């Protein structure tokens, strides 16, 4: 199968979540299209300094050129990172509490994480304090509304992926999940 061109140009980063696609264009503009964003089916947000976007079930976060993370959308589990829950955020708001240089961000269903340049992982939202999952992979329904360092990973993370659990690959190749 040959990939099909869909007509977008000057795209530097893409984030997908089920029925939504978010595109970051050269120059930093962000455009998200699809359903399940908590607002409109297609919208371009005036976030002009975007480096990377991350999409969850009903929230979107961006990493900016000024080394900040801004999030908006549904916030029932603190996934927007503004210190509260149960209030959806219709415009991008700064996630407070991230310290140091941010290498990348990812969003899971109801949580968001930032990989820091020191190799640590800071997360907020549902289930980020699970600890190592047991064999039943039970989901911990506890949540945090501002970034916390997920200590089970230490500070040697090379990359990570997030869904309901968060899994990270250490610089030595070991994998841990929480």
Image: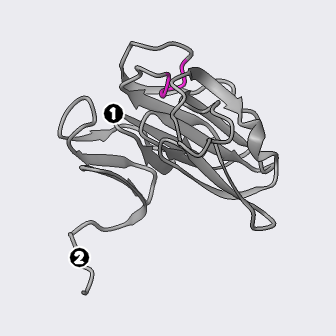
Lower sequence index among marks 2 and 1? 2
Label drawn at residue 58 = 1
Q: Which quadrant would the C terminus be assigned to in this image? A: top right
Residue that label 2 marks: 5
Q: Residues within 10 Å of mark 1 (few under 14, many from 20)?
A: many
Q: Nearer the viewer, mark 2 or mark 1?
A: 1
Quadrant of the image occupied by residue 144: top right
Q: Which sits in the foreground, 60 or 126?
A: 126
**Residue positioned most to the front:** 135
Q: Which residues are magenta?
A: 78-82
Overall secondary structure of the magenta section: loop
State the image coordinates of residue 36 (x, y, percent, origin top left).
Answer: 24, 37
State the image coordinates of residue 75 (x, y, percent, origin top left).
Answer: 41, 22
Whether the magenta-drawn stretch holds residue 130 is answered as no
State the image coordinates of residue 6 (x, y, percent, origin top left).
Answer: 21, 70
**Residue positioned most to the bottom:** 1
Q: Which quadrant would the N terminus be assigned to in this image? A: bottom left
Q: Which sits in the foreground, 107 or 28?
A: 107
- Judged from the image, the secondary structure of the residue bearing numbered disc 2 is loop
In this rendering, does residue 137 appear at all? yes
Q: Is residue 142 left or right of residue 54?
A: right
Q: Is residue 57 positioned above or below 157 on the image? A: above
- Judged from the image, the secondary structure of the residue bearing numbered disc 1 is loop
- Residue pictured at 37% horizontal, 47% vertical: 30
Whether the magenta-drawn stretch holds residue 80 is answered as yes
């Amino acid at each position: 199968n040959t990939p099909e061109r869909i007509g977008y140009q000057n795209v530097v980063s893409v984030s997908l979540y089920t029925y939504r696609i978010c595109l970051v264009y050269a120059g930093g503009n962000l455009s998200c299209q699809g359903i399940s964003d908590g607002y409109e089916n297609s919208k371009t947000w005036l976030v002009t300094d975007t480096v990377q976007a991350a999409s969850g079930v009903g929230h979107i976060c961006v990493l900016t050129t000024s080394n900040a993370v801004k999030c908006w959308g549904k916030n029932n589990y603190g996934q927007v990172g503004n210190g509260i829950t149960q209030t959806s955020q219709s415009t991008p708001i700064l996630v407070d509490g991230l310290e140091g240089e941010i290498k990348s961000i990812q969003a899971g269903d109801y949580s968001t994480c930032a990989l820091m340049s020191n190799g640590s992982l800071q997360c907020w939202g549902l289930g980020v304090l699970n600890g190592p999952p047991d064999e039943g992979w039970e989901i911990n329904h506890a949540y945090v509304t501002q970034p916390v360092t997920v200590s089970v990973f230490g500070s040697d993370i090379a990359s990570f992926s997030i869904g309901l659990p968060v899994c990270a690959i250490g610089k030595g190749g070991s994998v841990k999940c929480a």
